[in-house]
Image (tube, helix red, strand yellow):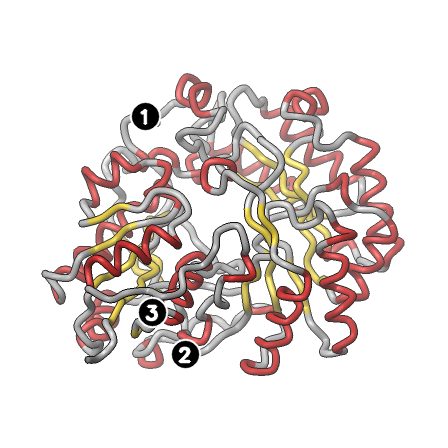
Amino acid sequence: MSSPHILLINPYIWDFTAFDLWAKPLGLLYLAGALRNNGYQVHLLDCLDVHFKGTEFLPPLTPRRAFGQGKYFRQRLSKPPGLQDIPRYYYRYGVPPAVFLQALRELPRPRAVLVTSSMTYWYPGVQETIRLVKSVYPRAPIILGGIYATLMPDHARKLVRPDHLIIGPGEGAILNLVDSISGHTSPSIPNPDNLDSYPLPAFDLYPCLDYICLLTSLGCPFSCPYCASKILQPRVRRRSAEGVSDEIVYWQRTKGILDFAFYDDALLIGFDNHLGPVLEEVLKQNMGFRFHTPNALHVREITLERARLLYRAGFKTLRLGLETTNWERQKAWGGKMDKADLHRAITSLRKAGFTPDQIEAYLLIGLPGQTLSEIEQTIREVKTLGIRARLAEYSPLPQTELWPEACRSSRFPLADAPIFHNNSLLPCLNPFSWESVQALKDLARS
């Protein structure tokens, strides 16, 4: 009897803007690895993959940037109801539907289709993806999981209408569900308390790779009011240093990968017993790895000794989780850092050898109650420290501590439709004007 076939899909993005900053559906790839480890035949279709079969016949994209970043394919769409007055174009990001449909038709009929989801306001892309799948495989059960499914399950059931919805971490639940659908028995379900029991994420399902995304831990010890990390991963768990270093070496030796992006929410926490040993081990390999931190580093954890190890290990792009230099706001959020921590961290990084263009600070803009002057002051203060300011527009997230205040302060009906959660709208910035937003962006770039 042949192994049951499971299809995994990373759906389209519908948005005003999207860019590949080391973005891969890592949770979906871990599920693919676990399914394959249990005897399933698995295929992956990533709608956002620029190396998707059939795209070689499309007009070429601009070359990938250094370290594997780059643009997605895109097609212009009509703006959704409620957003027609936004003075920007709206797009489907990903391969053209005809290319996706052709890939679907070439696959064996799946026993089940697993679709992930990310930002809540990207659900129209999930809707379209599932509609296309159903047009080819109308009887295949659709299982939806991911961030949107977890934060807005009722909305997903009503609007996207999957056959099954997975809320929260889904490894064990999905294996059990897929077993019940297919009649197959999975003999090896990963132990959620032992991350080293998980097979490697199935990056080998991609036809070509520009980089690899890494998780050394799950969860975060902090409880920032704007963040959904505690909802998505309630517990902090870590892999062994040996397991992480072995994975890094494995991808270099099997796929020739040198660029690795850490996806951890708290990469530097417990540094001396976790990331430190990982980096010491990979340094012994002398393979010229290049590391990146798109999810940001906790400023307070950066010391001169640690900065020197990061530099020697090959970190090339450092993102600091600053958010704001309104220190009263920082204190109210739990006091993760203060002004002295910020200065010490930047001084340490510069002494270790990092150049200003390698260091950026994420600045949250558009928070409920945040003024334009606070944002401007934060940008100017960061620039005086000789590093780059990267503006991160606040997206209101249901179930987070800040959600009720966001709903009260927004100029959009956030609770009515997630399309208004879009960070490009800066839905909670008050007073709002496109001119003031552009002025802030110009100041940050100057």
Q: Is 113 or 52 nearer to us in this picture?
A: 113
Q: Is residue 233 left or right of residue 131?
A: right
Q: Earlier in the sequence, mark 2 or mark 1?
A: 2
Three-letter code for the amino acid on which mark 2 is drawn: Pro
Residue 231, image x, y percentages: 46, 36
Lower position in the chain sequence, tag 3 or tag 1: 3
Work out which residue is located at the far top of the displayed protein and give it. 408
Q: Secondary structure at mark 2?
A: loop
Specify the quadrant of the image occupied by residue 6: bottom left
Q: Secondary structure at mark 3?
A: strand
x, y percent for residue 194: 54, 55
Q: Is residue 382 left or right of residue 182?
A: right
| Within-10-Å neighbours for mark 3: few <14, some 14–19, many 20+ | many
Q: Nearer the viewer, mark 3 or mark 1?
A: 3
Mark 3 is on which residue type?
Leu
Q: Amino acid at mark 1?
A: Ala
Q: Residue at x 35, y 27 (%)?
A: 414
The answer for how far apart the CA atoms under marks 3 and 1 are is 33 Å
Numbered label attached to residue 313: none
Q: Between marks 2 and 1, how big is the CA–CA gap?
A: 40 Å
Give the residue pinned by disc 2. 207
Q: Quadrant of residue 9?
A: bottom left
What residue sits 71% from the left and 56% below the top? 275
Residue of label 3: 44
